[in-house]
Amino acid sequence: MPKKSLRSIMLARRKHLAAEVCLSHSIRIQRRLVMLDVFKSACCVALYSPIFNEVFTEEVFHQALRAGKVVVYPRVRGESLDFVSVSSPAEFAPGAFGVMEPTGSHLIPPSALDLILVPGVAFDLFGNRLGYGKGFYDRVLCLGSRSAISVGLCYEMQLLDELPVEDHDAGLDLLITEERVCPFTQSGRRLLQET
């Protein structure tokens, strides 16, 4: 199935999730993440502002700040993303595509990120993701922050057997759902194990 059609189907499916399901699953997913060593050892964490019933990130935000981590969020600049340090939920305003973006001026280079949460429309168990079609995160992951651990947060209903993949698509290091944590190898994006 073409990416565009798959994107439409998966967005519609997620849109129809009940608010209480999104909240309860998001809490479970975030709690799984903050218990992992990759989160505990990270000094600089990049989060995203959720849209269209995406997995929430607020609990990760607060846990990271309490732990003294630098927390950044993306802001669209042309065809790329700037990562801006944020220390309060008040430091956001509507930005590109209606997504809440940081208003601050303290930019953090992608090479300084230790952990980056990557939003998506659909995911598979080979570490692939289907984004919104603009390629922002693919460019970040391919060009500037390969030292960062890339983590997809999603609901089980967003998981597919296998996604169509193109050469420019960047794979994930880790996928977390309300049911499991799936780490992937760097080469070949093959499933290592599930916990």
Image: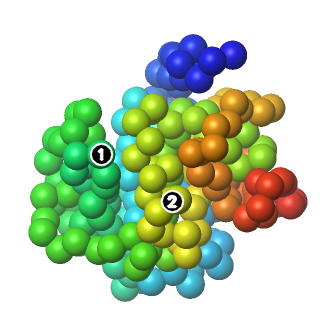
Q: Which mark is residue 141?
A: 2
Which image quarter is the N terminus in?
Answer: top right
Residue 138 x/y as whole percent: 50, 50
Residue type, numbered disc 1: Glu
* Mark 1 or 2, nearer chain start: 1
Q: Can residue 45 be seen here?
A: no
Residue at image location 55% in from the left, 69% down from the top: 146
Crowd around label 1: few <14 · some 14–19 · many ≥20 (10 Å) = few
Q: Quadrant of residue 25?
A: top right
Residue at image location 13% in from the left, 58% down from the top: 103
Q: Residue 88 carries which label?
A: none
Check disc 1 and report the residue beneath it: 79
Question: Toward the viewer: 166 or 116?
Answer: 166
Q: In which quarter of the image is residue 52?
A: top left
Residue 172 x/y as whole percent: 64, 55
Q: Distance between the residues labelled 1 and 2?
A: 14 Å
Residue 102 x/y as whole percent: 20, 57
Label 1 sits on a secondary structure element that is loop
Label 2 sits on a secondary structure element that is helix
